Image (cartoon, rainbow, N blue to C red):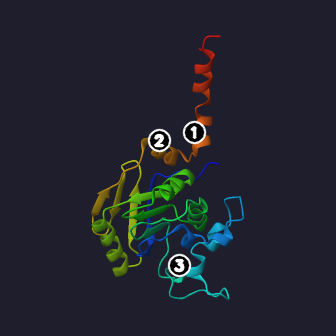
Amino acid sequence: MAYDKFNILKSTAVPLPIENVDTDQIIPARFLKATERVGFGDNLFRDWRFNSDNTPKAEFVLNNPLYSGKILVGGKNFGSGSSREHAAWAIYDYGFRCVVSSFFADIFKNNCLNIGVLPVQVSPEFAEKIFRAIEKDPKTEIEINLPEQTITIPASGDKESFDISSYKKDNMINGFDDIDYLVNMKPEIQEFASNLPL
């Protein structure tokens, strides 16, 4: 399944400066029954967003109209816990296209890359600069430049580079998942096969 192409994203951001956010907090286990990658955004951070009677918790950042955008800025060790893909699905389905943190759990990071969410790992110092900038002005924009592998706070000019594998970078830029990548290589695969000895 192809996803949105990712090139340069400039957006306001939602701050979630909580460390060790695990996948059960991102999408509680009781919502994992569906097999299609849609509808999970409704239950993103469900127990943090809603009371038991389904009324929104006013104090939670996703319920605060001051904050919006396609970038989620999380605390250190974001996406720890179980390896459920649904956590990445929920983030994508809610509308986020990038998650920024000073450290990601490896499996969560790979799950994001597989479905079109760019995990940008920054230094703790840069993460703090982002949180301070958003606290000062919730309309602060962040620019993610995937081709250049940079993240910038345009208002202050602060910039930092981030790492990503060349394979995943190419897939993100083209909107490919692993299957799309292979399908796109079909002519080369066929040519290679035709030259094999019988």
- Say which quarter of the image contains residue 192: top right
Q: Secondary structure at mark 3?
A: helix
Tell me the CA gap for discs 2 and 1: 9 Å
Q: Residue 161, relative to residue 140: is it above or below?
A: above
Residue type marked 2: Tyr
Query: Who's the residue at 48% across and 56% down the image?
Result: 109
Q: Amino acid at mark 1?
A: Tyr
Q: Earlier in the sequence, mark 2 or mark 3?
A: 3
Farthest-out residue, top: 198
Q: Can you tell which mark lies on residue 62?
A: 3
The residue beneath circle 1 is 181
Q: Which residue is mark 2?
A: 167
- Which label's residue is closer to the chain start, 1 or 3? 3
The front one of 40 and 175 is 40
Q: Residue at x 45, y 60 (%)?
A: 105
Q: Percent position (x, y) of residue 9?
A: 45, 59
Mark pair 2, 3: CA separation: 32 Å
Mark 1 vs 3: CB contact within 8 A: no
Mark 2 or mark 1, earlier in chain: 2
**Structural distance between the alpha carbons of marks 1 and 3:** 34 Å
Callout 2: SS: helix
Cβ–Cβ below 8 Å for labels 2 and 1?
A: yes
Say which of 143 and 106 sits in front. Answer: 106
Q: Quick check: 29 left or right of 174?
A: right
Image coordinates of residue 164 in percent, x first then y, are 41, 49
Q: Residue at x 47, y 68 (%)?
A: 72
| Element assignment for label 1 | helix
